[in-house]
Image: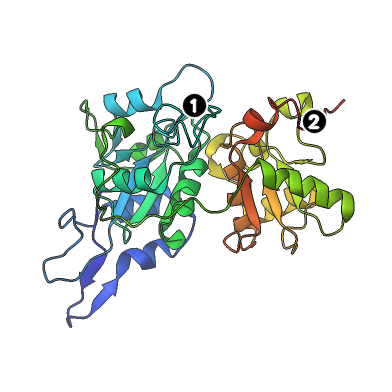
Amino acid sequence: TTTTTTTTTSDGDDNDTLSSLLGGRNLISIEDCIKASKFSKKGDDGDNGDGVIAERVVFIDGSWYHRGGRDGRQEFKNGPRIKGAKYIDMDDIATTKELFPNLNPKGLPHMLPPKELFAATMDALSITNNDHIIIYGKGGCIFTPRTWFLFRSLGHDPSKVHLMQGSLEDYIKEGGDADYEHTDDLVEAKTLDLDGEFSYKARDAMFVVDMDGMKEALEDEEKDPLTSPLLLDPRGTTFANGHIPGAIHVRYASIHKPDDTLQIKSREELEEIFQTAGVDVQTDRQILCTCGTGVSVCHLVLALEECGRNVMDGKTLIYDGSWAEWGFDPDTPKAVSK
């Protein structure tokens, strides 16, 4: 759903109602998401008719499943979906070996896309840099924080990127409008023109570290363990089978509520999780986050920011290649847990 934020009071003053409602928060309740969806749409270019570019909200279905055989893309096509929502497929809007063999010669999964692909995708979805983005998932989905990180990394205003607290089913149950008919109106990377001019202004992915950067972190740890970067890994049971030496285990499943994978725990609970793991959220040291394939790692970034860490200052990075790259390289050091 695309909506304008500008309303007029009886005395003619404009109120930035949507910004007031969402308040720059990462986590948005179902109730507030429904309120945001009620603003009327006034054109795909965001122009409200008087030359002023109005803020709008766009709902993004980021449903993706790492096991169980579910297909988020097909489920979005079949419906239901939040009325007017768009879908972003992290496996498609990515630096795939098929489309970018020089950028991803190892064929690593769902690597963050080049800025040209992201900009072309935003244009195809009629999303502007000024829009508020609310990312949601269907029940059983876990990894919507990856799509949240995607937007922020590629240059969207972080105060305008949000996550719905709860599932699509919760949204519908509480009275949110939904589309139920089949749709084929989805973006596919291979059909996009990446050589033209783009209305959306994207940047090269930020807040990421590559394999060389991770190796340097291990060398720094040997030289000075008190100032070297902290390594965090949020995987589940696979962590014990192999991980980067020195990585601290903070499971992504501990970050969301036990009975709802799409609701993040309170700040107090998250602070206790990090404290128990021996992680100082406010440390001046770099925090480098790694996981299996660069997906669950985004839970860590979200949780760190919810605890008050400034994750936009270049000291909190994700290793996008993660264990998919590190674990299969014969020359990298590896550790196992007993």
Q: Find residue 297 and report its horizontal and vertical position in percent.
A: 61, 41
Whether residue 46 is visible, yes or no, is yes
Residue situated furthest bottom in the rendering: 11
- Report crowding for label 2: few under 14, some 14 to 19, many 20 or more residues within 10 A (C-alpha): some
Q: Secondary structure at mark 2?
A: loop
Q: Find residue 91 and report its horizontal and vertical position in percent.
A: 44, 30
Applied colour scheme: rainbow
Whether residue 237 is visible, yes or no, is no
Task: Work out whether mark 1 precedes mark 2 in sequence or the reverse, and give the earlier one.
Answer: 1
Residue occupying image coordinates x 58% and y 37%: 294
Q: Find residue 252 and report its horizontal and vertical position in percent.
A: 64, 38
Q: Is residue 262 left or right of residue 238?
A: left
Residue situated furthest left in the rendering: 49
Marker disc for residue 213: none
Q: CA distance from mark 1 to mark 2?
A: 27 Å
User: From what the image shows, is residue 22 above or below residue 109?
Assistant: below
> Which-is-in-front pick, marks 1 and 2?
2
Q: Is residue 74 left or right of residue 112?
A: left
Q: Quadrant of residue 330?
A: top right
Marker disc for residue 334: 2
Residue occupying image coordinates x 71% and y 44%: 214
Which amino acid, mark 2?
Lys
Residue for badge 1: 65
